[in-house]
């Protein structure tokens, strides 16, 4: 019998994970099996992947991949399931949704729950939204990561703080502010390193001596949640010492004089030092070096803002305040100058209604904030109660704050929970129906980025494993069973991708209407990643042109004034701060922050054995003085607790954290922790000042030797 020749091909792919780099990948497939995943050429990601995704095949072919639909057979939360057909799964879900929709509670008793399990536009935010909009389900405010910072930028700049990240090679003074760039934005770090070779100085402002801080020229350990005070202290020095750019302020900013007065009157370096824990001399030196980057070092100053610093009560205002700094010194004038939070708003995807069809939302539909899942599931919000939860692209049992109460809600016998997942995550344990999901290698998607300016297509490299289906395929099945209009759902992913790339006129200035000009699905499939239609050395605010109502950088915000909020940048202390909550700090004196572990990406990758083994065990880093006070030695198991909960971790004693601060890296799956609870058992569901964001890093705890 003739032996057929083996067939090998390569397929263009894109990393789908919640990371600004959005790497280009190439997958080698032999006889239908993916045998290699590596970085592909692209000007920003330049052919290399991080250590997590270079092991992607361990994830795709993981022995615990969910292979078929299942229904619960044991008690809720026990994770006992039996196999069922797709027909039965779809029939069960549709019947329950219809029952609820036709009950007195109505369709708003159904809550979709998703976030950034994939960043793809098709599998992350297209037919899912259409389906739940058409159903009339409660809307989900997807706030768990970025909305506080986005709101802070929006009121100040009229868009996110954005510039072309590739221009950082021109910067000569680089501040990573709350950003572990070398780990969480590794391709930008490579460019920063290039700038450093040409004389750039790299600064890290961070409560934690993360890898980036350790590799920087200067680490300023700041007290968590006090970033706005530091920015205002810097402004004090800039104006006091006449280091500001009066011409830029006059031409392109609103309220410069008012902000100047506030900074000079209220934020002298000595006061700021007592708030931030950074010495007054260091505040003065930082301000002077920042303002003179152009004249002294020959290139502009660049601030890489990241999301950690907005995870506290005053997070929105903190980002707003930092975004004012480049305006005060005129750094926005130059390519490589300014501040970068996210490039996502530069894409025409943001807010484009063509995929999600917001016109289908019934008038008056309520919105629930995803940070408050505990409140939603425990009947603490206005009726109707949440009677059905459909989870996809998310793992709330591990990731949501106030975990004990989230788990209590998920245990409700009367809650019908569907989880569409790749693996048996912590959330899957609480499901009534489990649906197997495809990975990025098994479906089509189209990607923007929040860390560069390229559009990319991910082509399916292999057939779905087992009976796995993509999000869009599941919503097509459900829509068919519920007899929703075929014209809304009987549309192929290729057609959706092509539609998403059509230029459209957004209601505001950003994104520019023609960013996709000349970019088509055919070209992306043929040529690979294509840069948005924006100029080289893009410096969006070089000559003003802000997206605010005034067209200026709104140092004074009429919009905030109209809402009864402080119209000027100000320092808002964290909800839980020893300086403003001495009562709470008497019992829980340590400020805990919980950044992602370098081996994980939020809760993704924790089940990949090689990465989990590299991570070891949950740890908590504590300053030697705080450890000595509590009789804690490195390597000892300790309990970290507050009124919300307790988790165990191994103590690492060292000067990687400021006195009074502890750091635990996340986000471990509960199932892999000693007591089956992770750090989110202590975090709070309170919201930020702007944007309704999460306050994970606003968390007072006590650490004791574990019994
Ligand atoms: S997680 Fe980030 S750095 Fe790693 S491959 Fe994906 S996009 Fe690239």
Image (cartoon, rainbow, N blue to C red):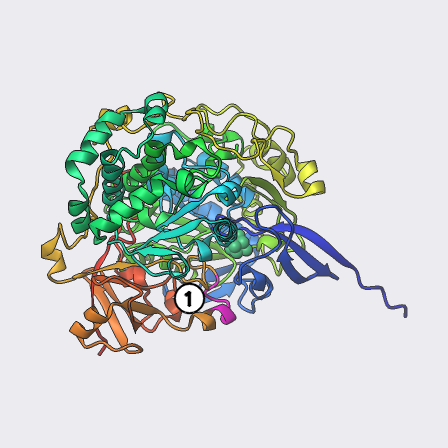
x and y, in percent, of residue 634 in the image? 29, 76
- The answer to whether residue 10 is left or right of residue 281 is right
- The answer to whether residue 666 is left or right of residue 46 is left
Which image quadrant for residue 397?
Answer: bottom left
Is residue 165 depicted above or below 47 in this figure?
above
x and y, in percent, of residue 393 in the image? 47, 51
Q: Which residues are magenta?
A: 605-611
> Which residue is rendered at x = 31% and y = 37% of the image?
320
In magenta segment, residue 634 = no
Tell me the quarter of the image containing the N terminus.
bottom right
Q: Is residue 123 or residue 540 the one in the foreground?
A: 540
x and y, in percent, of residue 522 in the image? 70, 37
- The answer to whether residue 654 is left or right of residue 13 is left
Q: Residue furthest right?
A: 1
In magenta segment, residue 609 = yes
- Which residue is identified by label 1? 79
Residue 214 makes an appearance in the image = yes
> Which residue is rendered at x = 57% and y = 55% of the image?
439
Is residue 688 depicted above or below 514 in this figure?
below
Which image quadrant for residue 157?
Answer: top left
x and y, in percent, of residue 150 in the image? 37, 38
Tell me the quarter of the image containing the C terminus.
bottom left
Q: Residues within 10 Å of mark 1 (few under 14, many from 20)?
A: some
Q: Residue furthest front?
A: 296
Is residue 121 depicted above or below 118 in this figure?
above
Is residue 500 depicted above or below 450 in this figure?
above
Residue 103 makes an appearance in the image = no
Q: Secondary structure at mark 1?
A: loop
> Which residue is rendered at x = 33% and y = 70% of the image?
619
Q: Is residue 544 or residue 2 the one in the foreground?
A: 544
Which image quadrant for residue 218?
Answer: bottom left
């Amino acid at each position: 019998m003739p032996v057929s020749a083996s067939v090998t091909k390569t397929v263009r792919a894109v990393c789908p994970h919640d990371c600004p780099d959005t790497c280009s990948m190439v997958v080698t497939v032999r006889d239908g099996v993916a045998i290699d995943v590596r970085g592909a050429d692209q000007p920003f990601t330049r052919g290399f992947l991080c250590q997590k995704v270079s092991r992607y095949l361990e994830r795709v072919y993981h022995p615990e991949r969910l292979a078929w639909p299942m229904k619960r057979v044991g008690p809720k939360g026990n994770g006992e399931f039996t196999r069922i057909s797709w027909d039965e799964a779809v029939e069960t879900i549709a019947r329950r949704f219809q029952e609820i929709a036709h009950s007195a509670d109505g369709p708003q008793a159904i809550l979709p729950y998703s976030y950034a399990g994939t960043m793809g536009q098709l599998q992350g935010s297209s037919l899912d939204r259409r389906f739940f909009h058409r159903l009339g389900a409660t809307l989900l405010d997807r706030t768990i990561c970025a909305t506080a910072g986005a709101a802070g930028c929006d009121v100040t700049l009229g868009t996110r703080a954005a510039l072309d990240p590739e221009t950082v090679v021109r910067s000569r003074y680089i501040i990573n502010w709350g950003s572990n760039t070398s780990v969480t934005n590794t391709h930008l770090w490579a460019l920063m390193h290039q700038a450093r070779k040409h004389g750039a100085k790299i600064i890290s402002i961070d409560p934690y001596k993360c890898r980036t801080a350790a590799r920087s020229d200067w680490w300023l350990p700041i007290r968590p949640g006090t970033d706005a005070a530091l920015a205002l202290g810097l402004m004090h020095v800039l104006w006091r010492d006449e280091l500001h750019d009066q011409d830029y302020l006059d031409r392109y900013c609103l309220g410069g004089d008012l902000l100047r007065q506030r900074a000079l009157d209220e934020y002298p370096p000595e006061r700021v030092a007592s708030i931030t824990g950074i010495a007054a001399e260091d505040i003065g030196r930082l301000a002077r070096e920042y303002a003179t980057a152009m004249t002294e070092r020959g290139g502009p100053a660049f601030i890489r803002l990241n999301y950690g610093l907005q995870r506290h009560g005053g997070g929105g205002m903190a980002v707003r305040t930092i975004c004012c700094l480049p305006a005060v010194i005129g750094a926005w004038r130059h390519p490589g100058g300014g501040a970068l939070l996210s490039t996502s708003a530069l894409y025409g995807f943001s807010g484009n209604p063509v995929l999600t069809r917001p016109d289908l939302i019934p008038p008056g539909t309520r919105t629930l904030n995803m940070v408050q899942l505990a409140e939603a599931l425990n009947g603490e919000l206005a009726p109707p109660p949440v009677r059905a939860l459909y989870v996809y692209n998310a793992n709330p049992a591990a990731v949501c704050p106030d975990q004990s109460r989230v788990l209590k809600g998920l245990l409700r016998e009367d809650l019908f929970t569907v989880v569409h997942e790749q693996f048996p995550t912590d959330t899957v344990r609480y499901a009534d129906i489990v649906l197997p999901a495809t990975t990025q290698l098994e479906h089509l998607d189209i990607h923007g980025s929040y860390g560069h300016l390229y559009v990319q297509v991910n082509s399916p490299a292999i057939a779905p494993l087992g009976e796995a289906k993509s999000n869009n395929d599941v919503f097509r099945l459900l829509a068919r069973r519920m007899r929703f209009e075929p014209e809304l759902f009987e549309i192929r992913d290729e057609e959706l991708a092509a539609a998403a790339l059509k230029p459209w006129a957004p209601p505001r200035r950003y994104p520019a209407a023609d960013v996709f000009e000349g970019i088509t699905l055919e070209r992306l499939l043929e040529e690979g990643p294509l840069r948005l239609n924006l100029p080289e050395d893009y410096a969006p605010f070089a000559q003003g042109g802000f997206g605010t109502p005034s067209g200026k950088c709104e140092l004074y915000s009429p919009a905030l004034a109209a809402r009864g909020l402080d119209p000027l940048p100000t320092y808002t202390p964290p909800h839980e701060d020893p300086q403003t909550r001495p009562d709470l700090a008497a019992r829980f004196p340590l400020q805990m922050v919980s950044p992602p572990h370098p081996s994980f990406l939020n809760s993704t990758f924790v089940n990949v054995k090689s990465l989990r083994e590299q991570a070891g065990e949950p740890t908590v880093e504590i300053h030697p003085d705080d450890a000595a006070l509590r009789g804690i030695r490195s390597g000892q198991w300790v309990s970290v607790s507050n009124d919300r909960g307790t988790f165990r971790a191994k103590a690492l004693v060292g000067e990687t954290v400021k006195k009074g601060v502890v750091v635990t890296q996340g986000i471990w799956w509960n199932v892999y922790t000693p007591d089956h609870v992770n750090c989110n058992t202590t975090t709070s569901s309170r919201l930020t000042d702007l944007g309704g964001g999460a306050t994970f890093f606003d968390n007072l705890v006590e650490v004791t030797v574990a019994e």
